[in-house]
Amino acid sequence: MRELTKRQCDTVAFIRKYIIDKTYPPTVREIANYLTISPKGAHDHLRALQKKGILRVDPHRSRSIELLDDLHHDRMVAIPLWQLINNEQQLLEKNEESWFVPMGFIQSGYEHFALQMPDTSMQGGGICLGDTLVFRRIEKTQQNSIVLIYLHDKFTIRRYAQEGSRFCLRTEPVNSLFISTVYTQSMQVIAQLVGVLRSYG
């Protein structure tokens, strides 16, 4: 399973958009500038993506990045697109559409679906309004993962952590329009975030 982190998804999306716009790949320094990290940090992201089979880089040539999974439709898979209905986000409904995502997001034996981010509550964590989120249906989730949950009669997307017998659910970062942190002893985990897709059009 080649699950991508949020920053790795951003890196792939930037490279893809750059190639579409300019017909050649970016340099490591351009990737670093876009991610606001050091060139060494950008190199580390590229090495990790190479190990996951997402891209390849010729170390002896400049601008030699080649995307593998994301540019080939036969390496993509269609998953259902769901939507949150009404402003209170009280109903999760399956759309008639499907959404194509990289095979690296998919783990055999689990149900996956896509959902558009409905608000700006996670913008500080790099998830923006309108981003397409790829979720894996799961009842138990990992500590500090981002999850879709059902809490207080509504669906919401939050960073999850367990503290003793309580669950801590928080936005990223503190946002005056949203409650920043909620503690509860009862909630329902619907799915765990495994990838983020963004259109730059």
Image (tube, grey):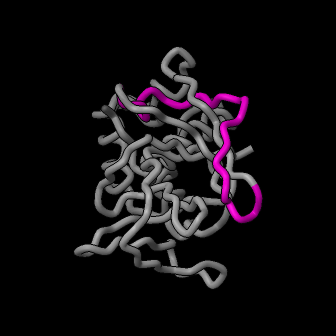
Quarter of the figure with residue 61 = top left
Q: Residue at x 60, y 31 (%)?
A: 80
Q: Kindly give the residue lying farthest to the top in the view shown.
A: 74
- The quadrant in which the N terminus is found is top left
Residue 189 horizontal/vertical position (percent): 43, 55
Residue 151 higher or lower than 14, as above or below: below
Quarter of the figure with residue 197 = top right
Residue 3 horizontal/vertical position (percent): 36, 39
Q: Is residue 155 magenta?
A: no
- Relative to residue 163, is residue 29 drawn left or right? right
Residue 170 higher or lower than 157, as above or below: below
- Relative to residue 101, is residue 59 drawn left or right? left
- The quadrant in which the C terminus is found is top right
Would you say residue 28 is visible in this rendering? Answer: no
In depth, the one of 70 and 104 nearer the eye is 104
Q: Which residues are magenta?
A: 86-108
In depth, the one of 145 and 164 nearer the eye is 164
Q: Kindly give the residue lying farthest to the left in the view shown.
A: 164
Residue 135 horizontal/vertical position (percent): 49, 43
- Relative to residue 66, is residue 81 drawn left or right? right
